[in-house]
Image (cartoon, rainbow, N blue to C red):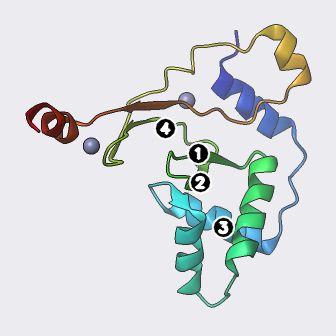
């Protein structure tokens, strides 16, 4: 059995070199440099410190192109913000619905799940997301005492 992560690797290997533009490469480099996920705005800000200035719309358009090519993953937060990370980084989070604090999970619970065979033939899997929502220690204490 091939795990989801292996499937992603195989897909990436089978693909002929994806053609990405200089701007997309620039964004990909920023995401790889950073240990954390970055939003489009954060990327936009970081690139502003460099020489080549990219407009926010251009940043988002190129991020979308990178997602489609299976090079980066996107994660939607409850507040509408989207965070991006290199696709090979398989990290999941516990998010507090009250204060928004996030904690990284160790390991990936999805990794051991296999795609149903019927789907896997018609569907090219690029990445998955998995979110846990709840109340952090601080917020649940506040709720209980207040
Ligand atoms: Zn909280
Ligand atoms: Zn995962």
Q: Which residue corresponds to mark 1?
A: 75
Work out whether 119 lies above or below 70: above
Query: Of the residues under marks 1 and 4, which one precedes in the sequence?
Result: 1
Residue on which disc 4 sits? 91
Residue 19: image quadrant is: bottom right
For label 3, count other residues whose C-alpha is less than 10 Å away and answer few (under 14), some (14-19) or many (20+): many
Q: Residue drawn 55% across and 61% down?
A: 39
Looking at the image, tell me whether mark 3 or mark 2 is earlier in sequence order.
3
- Find numbered disc 2 in the image and state the secondary structure of the residue it sits on: strand
Mark 1: give few (<14), some (14-19) or many (20+) Cα within 10 Å: some
**Residue 14: x, y in percent?**
86, 36
Q: Residue at x 58, y 45 (%)?
A: 75
Quarter of the image that includes the N terminus: top right
Q: Judge from the rendering whether residue 72 lies leftward or rightward of residue 46; answer left or right.
A: right
Q: Tag 3's secondary structure? A: helix
Q: Residue at coordinates 74% horizontally, 50% vertically from top-left?
A: 67
Tell me, for residue 84, which label it has, or none.
Answer: 2
- Quick one: label 3 or label 1, which is nearer the N terminus? 3
Q: Nearer the viewer, mark 2 or mark 1?
A: 1
Q: Which mark is residue 101?
A: none
Q: Earlier in the sequence, mark 4 or mark 3?
A: 3
Q: CA distance from mark 3 to mark 1?
A: 16 Å
Give the CA separation, mark 3 to mark 2.
10 Å
Q: Secondary structure at mark 1?
A: strand
Q: Which residue position is annotated with label 3?
A: 27
| Image location (x, y in percent) of residue 81 | 55, 55
Mark 4 Cβ inside 8 Å of ligand 2 = yes
Instruction: Work out which residue is located at the far left of the displayed protein and give it.
Output: 145
Q: Is residue 38 left or right of residue 105?
A: right
Q: Earlier in the sequence, mark 2 or mark 1?
A: 1
State the SS at label 4. Answer: loop
Residue 113 in the image: above or below residue 107: above
């Amino acid at each position: 059995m091939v795990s989801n992560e292996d499937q992603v690797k195989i897909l990436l290997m089978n693909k002929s070199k994806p053609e990405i533009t200089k701007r997309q490469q620039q964004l990909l480099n920023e995401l790889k440099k950073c240990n954390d996920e970055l939003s489009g705005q954060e990327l936009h800000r970081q690139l502003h410190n460099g020489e080549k200035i990219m407009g926010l719309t251009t940043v988002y358009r190129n991020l979308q192109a990178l997602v489609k090519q299976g090079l980066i993953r996107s994660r939607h937060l409850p507040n509408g913000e989207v965070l991006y990370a290199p696709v090979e980084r398989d990290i999941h989070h516990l998010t507090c619905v009250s204060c928004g604090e996030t904690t990284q999970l160790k390991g990936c619970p999805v990794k051991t799940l296999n795609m149903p065979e019927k789907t896997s033939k018609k569907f090219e899997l690029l990445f998955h997301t998995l979110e846990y929502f709840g109340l952090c220690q601080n917020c649940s204490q506040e709720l209980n005492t207040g």
